[in-house]
Image (spheres, grey):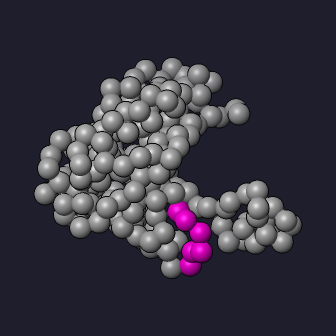
Amino acid sequence: MIDGIAAYADSNGYSTKVYVRGGSDMEPSWNSDTTTRSWVDGYASTYTKLLYNVGSADGCPQTGNGGSDGSCNNGWKQSDVFYVSWGADPSVPVPEIYATSGANAKQWQKIKLYGVVSEDQTMSIVGSLTQWNACQETGPCNGTDNKPSAGWQQLYDQLNSDVKTAQGLSFSTDMSWEK
């Protein structure tokens, strides 16, 4: 499907203005780790375009040194979130940073640290995803309504709290149901 859309864009002269990529909202609480890994592997077996994981790290640790594979919700481990976000070519993470408490940013920093320490891979997180507009439209979203700038700052600060996970962030993006 993604390749078909990209081919349409190319053949109609849009490819200089539109970049076609795949994306999936991969969340431990909503599917099993094995099903999600299989889906990502299926995408990877035929892809020509990047796959953005715009998902969460539900229940994953907010602390730790990256030396153990911490448990997340629904039987997932940090290694599963790492795999579907970065370990499987062509995956790239744009994580949900919804929690105003900063918990989501801590979880993703610890997943990146796990990758560095335990997988010997440095995951590059390209940006953050918030749901502020969606919450304004359909809310309330008490405690999960970070503004885009706040979600970006939380993730940036957490990633740069440790030299092993330090990096810049290219962008932030925000969910909306109506815009």
Image quadrant containing the C terminus = top right
When the figure is inspected, residue 37 is found, relative to residue 60, above or below; the finding is: below
87 in the magenta segment: no
Identify the residue at image location x=41%, y=33%. Answer: 153
When the figure is inspected, residue 52 is found, relative to residue 120, above or below; the finding is: above
In the rendered structure, which segment of residues is drawn in magenta?
A: 46-51
Residue 139 location, x and y as percent? 54, 22
Dividing the picture into quadrants, the one containing residue 158 is top left
Of residues 153 and 128, the one drawn nearer to the viewer in this rendering: 153
Q: Is residue 165 left or right of residue 153?
A: left
Identify the residue at image location x=44%, y=28%. Answer: 150
Identify the residue at image location x=45%, y=45%. Answer: 169
Q: Main secondary structure of the magenta part?
A: loop
Of residues 119 and 135, the one drawn nearer to the viewer in this rendering: 119
Q: Residue furthest bottom?
A: 45
Q: Is residue 83 visible?
A: yes
